Amino acid sequence: QVRLVESGGGLVQAGESLKLSCAASRNLLSFASMAWYRQPPGKQRELVALIASGGSTNYADSVKGRFTISRDNAKNTVYLQMNSLKPEDTAVYYCNAAGYNFAGPYWGQGTQVTVSS
């Protein structure tokens, strides 16, 4: 069974930074990709950033240049560095993992990020 545990959310003011962490219960290289999604209040869940097993990354247009996804394979942890936060970044942020051969997807429990203006 795969467990993903997010941490690092909180309440910040616009313009500030936060770094989210996602600790996986097994080696990150066993997943085809790791990603961060978010779900703003009253809206659907959306992809924020993705990092493939080979290291390539992909970002939503709304966060390009402000957010950075990275991983530490030795710690089985994926990060999301969020800079220049805006009120519209307020959401529950979820860690996601996609396995090979269509295994998963796997989800964490989510962590709340609130950005005040």
Image (spheres, helix red, strand yellow):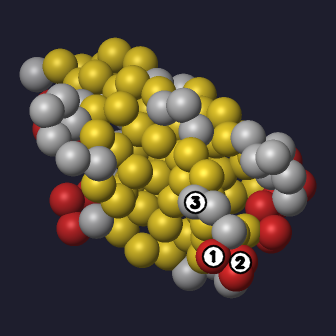
State the residue at coordinates (50%, 75%).
57
Q: Position of residue 58 (x, y in %)?
A: 42, 74
Q: Is residue 29 above or below residue 24?
A: below
| Among the two numbered marks 2 and 3 on one chain, the one whose residue lies closer to the N terminus | 2
Q: Position of residue 105 (x, y in %)?
A: 58, 60
- Which residue shows up at 59% across the image and 28% down it? 7
Q: Nearer the viewer, residue 7 or 106?
A: 106
Disc 1 marks a residue whose amino acid type is: Phe
In this rendering, is residue 33 above or below 44? below
Residue 54 vertical position relative to residue 97 in the rendered view, above or below: below
Label 3 and label 1: CA atoms lie apart by 8 Å
Residue at 60% across / 33% down in the picture? 6
Viewed as shown, does residue 16 lie left or right of 41? right
In the image shown, does 27 or 103 lie closer to the viewer?
A: 103
Q: Secondary structure at mark 1?
A: helix
Relative to 80, is 4 on the left or the right? right
Residue 72 position, x and y percent, is 76, 56
Q: What residue is shown at x 73% (from left), y 41% (from top)?
A: 3
SS under mark 3: loop
Give the residue type that dot 2 points to: Tyr
Crowdedness of circle 1 by 10 Å Cα count: few (<14), some, many (20+)? Answer: few
Observer-side mark, 1 or 2, equals 1
The residue where tag 3 is placed is: 105
Quarter holding the C terminus is: top left
Marks 2 and 3, how far apart in space?
A: 10 Å
Q: Could you tell me the amino acid type at mark 3? A: Pro
Q: Which mark is residue 102?
A: 1
Give the quadrant of residue 90. Answer: top left
Left or right, residue 63 beside residue 100: left
In the rendered structure, find residue 100 and report the number of the disc placed on it: 2
| Residue 12 at least partly seen | yes
Q: Are marks 1 and 2 in contact (CB under 8 Å)?
A: yes
